[in-house]
Image (cartoon, rainbow, N blue to C red):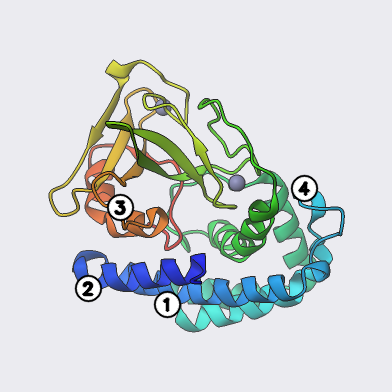
Amino acid sequence: MKSTWDTRIRRATELSSAYPFAAEGLRFYAQIAMLQQQLYSQIEAAPAQFFSLDGSSWNALNPSALPPKFSNFVRNLGKIAPAALAQRTDELLRKDSAFWLRLLDQYWHSAATTADEPDGSTRGAAEQHLAWLFLQPFAEFLAARHEQIQSDGNARRCPFCGGAPIVGVLRPEGDGAKKSLICTLCAHEWAFRRIYCPACGEERESHMGFYSASEIPHMRVDVCETCHTYMKSVDLTKMGLAVPVVDELAALPLDLWARQNGYHKLHINIVGA
Ligand SMILES: [Zn+2]
Ligand SMILES: [Zn+2]
């Protein structure tokens, strides 16, 4: 059986030929996902090294086991990263394990922060970004083992870990579609109301809009006129093979349109767009 990581890597490779305007980011993503996949295999092989045995609660992570794995991950990422981010990985590798431990522990317990600045633009943003990429496999491992969480459609942050949503999903239901959101950190997907801003809670239809681009018709961008935030959604009724977090990376024309029109992104994606 193919793992989630294989599915994402394969989709990124497919999309990089279909959408040349996003090929660079998609190829970089595929390499990041391979590093995350290796990390995930290590977690699966020896979960007790990273988690206390009391189960799958968010606090089960044992942060003291992380620094050696983190430095290794950051070193490998530095070898494949664009120059600006590679410089930040070098800087981070010069810090000590106490610094890495604090960074990871804080990130884990404050859940994914909202930021709309390309990774590497400031040192703090780059450190948060690297912590995020490294912690994703740990968060996904836990979320996959956690019991089902019911959502009433009103949660604007992940009901499991408190992370921000990274992409919306429209799944076929009857003659229409139902909406859900996917978490930046643990990849948990939860039901979400169709007309509702995940950033500020706006729910008036007149204050919410969307836009799509002919280059990539199964993606759309939802915007809020109250807080000027945007987030993309993938419409699985139009493209059943899409892998939401990966297709999000391909829809660069929508980021361009949204930013040119004064909207800021709810949360940057893995490659910093
Ligand atoms: Zn989550
Ligand atoms: Zn809003």
Q: Secondary structure at mark 1?
A: helix
The residue mark sitting in front, 3 or 2, is: 3
The residue depicted at 28 percent of the width and 37 percent of the height is 262
Q: Are marks 3 and 1 in contact (CB under 8 Å)?
A: no
The residue that label 2 is drawn on is 17
Numbered mark located on residue 240 in the image: 3
The three-letter code of the residue at mark 4 reads: Ser
Closer to us: 158 or 226: 158
Ligand 2 occupies quarter: top left
The residue mark sitting in front, 4 or 3, is: 3
Q: CA distance from mark 4 to mark 2?
A: 40 Å
The residue depicted at 41 percent of the width and 75 percent of the height is 82
Q: CA distance from mark 4 to mark 1?
A: 38 Å
Image location of residue 256, percent across then percent down: 24, 50
The residue that label 1 is drawn on is 83
The residue depicted at 59 percent of the width and 57 percent of the height is 128
Q: Are marks 4 and 3 in contact (CB under 8 Å)?
A: no
Numbered mark located on residue 57 in the image: 4
Q: Are marks 3 and 2 in contact (CB under 8 Å)?
A: no
The three-letter code of the residue at mark 1 reads: Ala
- Considering only order in the chain, which callout, 3 or 4, is on the residue closer to the N terminus? 4
Q: CA distance from mark 4 to mark 3?
A: 32 Å
Image location of residue 51, percent across then percent down: 80, 61
Image location of residue 35, percent across then percent down: 54, 76
Closer to us: 58 or 116: 58
Instruction: From this view, report whether residue 71 is shown above or below residue 122.
Output: below
Q: CA distance from mark 1 to mark 2?
A: 23 Å
- Considering only order in the chain, which callout, 2 or 4, is on the residue closer to the N terminus? 2
The three-letter code of the residue at mark 3 reads: Gly
